[in-house]
Amino acid sequence: MYPEFVLLYSMELTIPYVKERIAYFNQSIFAEELPPIEVKLTTAKTFLAKCTYKIRRNLFGKVRREDFCLRINRILNLTPDEIDDVIIHEMIHYYIGYKGMRDSASHGKVFRRMMYEINHTYHRHITISHKNIPDCTESITGKPVKWHVVAAVSMNDGRMGIKVLPRITQRIYRYYILVRKSPEVSHIDLFLAKHPILEQYPNSSALKIHYIEQQKLEEMLKDAERLQIINEREIRKIDNQA
């Protein structure tokens, strides 16, 4: 029996689902210190999720934060674990804002300390910024473009998919073997690629892909180096001149 194949997984969020996850993490991570927060769904392509609130000042200049709201993209091409990480990320913002804590920046020292503690204690994978929507228009200019291990997946129905993988040999090997066994997949190739658009894709070994037009895929991989799986501990570059 093959493991459940979730390459085609795409989860449509609902407000009750998000509220249930917030309540769960409020109890398990935040010691039930956060009151219920308003949740709104969006289809915006400029952000994945964000926590917003209004700042009020009384006659004596004292600041009060209120009307907290978690806005989250309605359709996230993410696994449930990745969605949970997004929700917890925004709950850290909510906690800092609700408690009136001062931070050095939006993702400053206070945020980072809480993020690291939660990741370590609860084995989460929360990151500083959300770059999990492939078509997100968030700017990535001005930052060094990194090399990524990329799986290009051809489906039997003609569609193409892409997955950015961690640069960990065992995880790449596992993903490659499991995806190749799927009856829905006709072919899978591995590349070492460097392209700004790849920065916008989630980096994980979850069994999933993001569908993409072949022309766009070819553009991202035009200067890529092909990789070959030798075994679960070794991956080599293929000589393109061979």
Image (cartoon, helix red, strand yellow):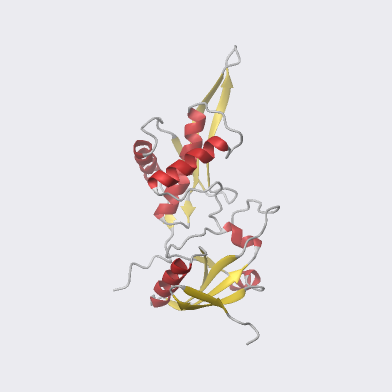
Q: In which quadrant is the C terminus drawn?
A: bottom right
Q: What residue is rendered at 53% in x and 28% in y?
A: 101
Residue 88, position as x, y percentages in the image: 44, 43
Residue 234, position as x, y percentages in the image: 48, 75
Q: In which quadrant is the N terminus drawn?
A: bottom left
Total number of numbered discs in the rendering: 0
| In front of the other: 197 or 146 | 146
Q: What residue is rendered at 58% in x and 65% in y?
A: 148
Residue 93, position as x, y percentages in the image: 51, 36
Q: Is residue 43 above or below residue 57?
A: below
- Most extreme residue toward the left is 1
Q: Is residue 130 above or below residue 185?
A: above
Q: What residue is rendered at 48% in x and 54% in y?
A: 76
| In front of the other: 107 or 231 | 231
Q: Is residue 163 above or below residue 65?
A: below
* Residue 156 in sight in this render: no
Quarter of the image for residue 63 reads top right
Q: Is residue 174 above or below residue 90?
A: below
Left or right: residue 202 compared with residue 21: right
* Residue 186 in sight in this render: yes
Residue 180, position as x, y percentages in the image: 42, 76
- Most extreme residue toward the bottom is 242
Q: What residue is rendered at 63% in x and 51% in y?
A: 138
Quarter of the image for residue 19 reads top left
Left or right: residue 77 compared with residue 28: right
| In front of the other: 165 or 10 | 165
